[in-house]
Image (cartoon, helix red, strand yellow):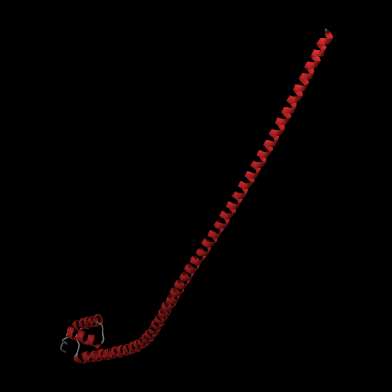
Amino acid sequence: MSQVLFNQFAYTDRLTKGGFTPEQARASAEALESAFSETIVTKHDFDRLQMALEADIGEVKSQVAATEARLDGKMAGLDAKMAGLDARIAGVEARLVGVEAEMASVETRLEAKIASTAAGLETKIASTAAGLETKIASVETKLEGKIASTAAGLEAKIAAVQLGLEAKMASQETRLVSEIHSTVYKGVGLLAALTGLAALAARFWK
């Protein structure tokens, strides 16, 4: 029996192309090379081993194909879901555009209403201020007139009181002067009477 020559690199490349990972292909090649180096293998054994490996490779390819099919199905489902999400996002964006437009319209209306209200309030404030100024001026005029009338009345009363006091004082003065004159006259008469009595007494005592 002749020893079988084994090309590890070609074997690894074939396994990798068949679907094995590089680590799996390298491990299989090393294990096979080790077996070849320890045992004399016939071509029949090698062909049988090669058929078994090809069967394994076919199974791996089937599994890979099935996995790819499942992945393709899942990817298609994900694509459909993504398309649905894109549509929903587009709808939300469209609604947001509508909401933004409505908010802009509301903001415009509010600004117009605020401006109108402010103008109305300013007009009302100006009108109220003018009315208050008119009322204040009228009250001032009335108070000034009342003060002037009261002052004139008080001045007239003061003048009348002063005249009354002056007249009363003059009357009292006249009465006092008359009483003084009367008292003086009485005193002079009494003095004359006393003088006469004194003269009579003097004569009597002589």
Name the residue located 73 percent from the left edge and 30 percent from the top edge. Answer: 179
Q: Nearer the viewer, residue 123 or 89?
A: 123
**Image quarter for residue 30?**
bottom left
Residue 49, percent across and down?
Answer: 24, 89
Q: Nearer the viewer, residue 65 or 103?
A: 103
**Image quarter for residue 6?**
bottom left
Left or right of 189? Residue 70 is left
Residue 92, percent across and down?
Answer: 40, 82
Left or right of 183? Residue 83 is left
Name the quarter where the N terminus is drawn: bottom left
Name the quarter where the C terminus is drawn: top right
Name the residue located 79 percent from the left edge and 16 percent from the top edge. Answer: 196
Q: Nearer the viewer, residue 160 or 140?
A: 160
**Image quarter for residue 106?**
bottom left
Left or right of 32? Residue 83 is right
Above or below: residue 189 compared with residue 114? above
